[in-house]
Image (cartoon, grey):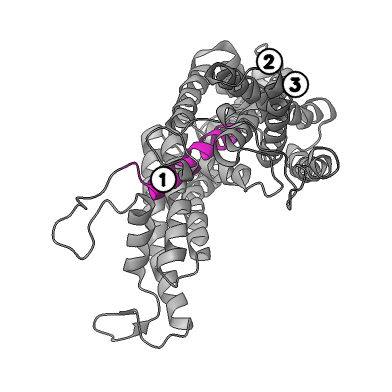
Amino acid sequence: MSDSDPDADGDPSVFARVVAPFVDRSVAERLVISVAAIFLSILVGFALVLVSGRIAECSTAAWTMPITGLGFCYNPFEVYVVLFNGALGYPFAVGDPGLFNPGWTPFNLSFGLTLSETTLLIFTGLSVAVAFRAGLFNIGTQGQLVVGALSTALTVLALAPLLPAGPVAGLVLIVVGTAAGAVGGGVWGAIPGALKAYADANEVITTIMLNFVAANVAYVLVLEVFRAEGSSVVATRYVPEYAQFPSVLFPPSTDFTLIALLVGVAFIGALYYFVEHTSLGYDLRTSGVQAAAAEYGGVNAKLTTVRAMTLSGALGGVGGSVWVLMSEGRWMASVPDLGFDGITVSILAGNNPLGVLPAAFLFGILKGGALEIGFRTDVPTELVAVLRGLIILFVAMPEFFRMIGRYAGVGGAGGASDAGGSGSADPDESAGGDGGEADA
């Protein structure tokens, strides 16, 4: 057997040498991976824009490729300039002398819309990230957001007549409404958590199904009971204006307030401290890495599962609260897919709360820039959605190499040891309980 084992004589195979660099990744390497994924997606997106422009019909070419002379209906350079520059409100001068636009101010409509998307994605990204850190796949953040949003709208509408209108009442209603959203989302997240812990139900299936249950139950409740009188759409009444997040510096039409963004940043710091520096956070992380070893060390794995899903759902519910109190002012049936976008934000952030802010900002730029592309170019905005998908594809590729490395017995503590032991370890040791304790 030693003749066929490359690790036995210290001479790893060519395959092992190729896979080894991709197996163990530090935080810095994860950052490099994410940045590289963004640039690779931009390059592939460049090619897709060209191909789409070649297939489309146009009277004159928007861009001609040098040397070849081939004409394309879509100019990829214009697409990216409009995408990134437009999402910020055009701070850079294009086609004019000088680099910066002298008339630019950060408090413009386009940048406000971008930051509005960023703020909402912070909460849904955190929701998905905390579940992933516990080794759980919460695909139900969208449903938890819907329940949280409806809980917030109904709570504020019920309490508003009991309080005198004014700033104090507004502050109370915002706090209570946000708490109601957290409770609603948390309860909805606890359901798949309990099913996972005590009935061994697959949380991917239950959370996906609960998305449909939440959307349809909320729709029927509003349609039959809470619908605003005379409304042409399925929606509740507007919450009082003084009970909504006030616009600060940005135009009210942006549906954005710096207060909500600062609250989101505070949630990032609080969640990071909770996960990394508290005993409950340690239980959550160890359960996600190795549930059997964590339970052997005294962690109540089932209770931790319920707690993690409840916290994840509560964060999604807060995202729904912010959507109601900052963006819409009411609950309506056309809830955007913020929960599903939170999955992509969490993946790009490496499931690290500190990485959620830049990841959410990037996807906020992509969504805000897509609106500019629709207004200023003939390029289909669906190509921006393709760009988001490419980013996730390239970010996830190192995980594919990591998986191969584990099966090949390549890597250190973060690679092969998670699979049961290092490639050079004694088979009896890697198969026994000592290997589990070492992983713990």
Q: Earlier in the sequence, mark 3 or mark 1?
A: 1
- Relative depth, front residue between 230 and 103: 230
Q: Earlier in the sequence, mark 2 or mark 3?
A: 2
Residue 12 shows in this picture: no
Q: Which residue is mark 3?
A: 302
| SS at mark 2 in the image | helix
Secondary structure mostly taken by the magenta-highlighted segment of the chain: helix
Q: Give how far across and how far down residue 405 sits, in percent.
A: 51, 44
Would you call the spot at circle 3 few (<14 residues within 10 Å), some (14-19), or many (20 or more)? some
Q: Which residue is mark 1?
A: 34
Boundaries of the magenta span: 106-128
Whether label 3 touches label 1, CB < 8 Å: no
Q: Which quadrant holds the N terminus?
A: top right
Q: Give how far across and how far down residue 280 sits, in percent.
A: 60, 14
Seen at 82% across and 41% down, the residue is 217
Depth-wise, is mark 1 or mark 2 nearer the camera? 1
Residue 114 lies in the magenta stretch: yes
Q: Which residue is mark 2?
A: 296
Residue 64 in the figure: left or right of residue 181:
left
Rounded to the nearest angstrom, the CA distance separating label 2 from label 3 is 13 Å
Q: Give how far across and how far down residue 392 sits, in percent.
A: 51, 51
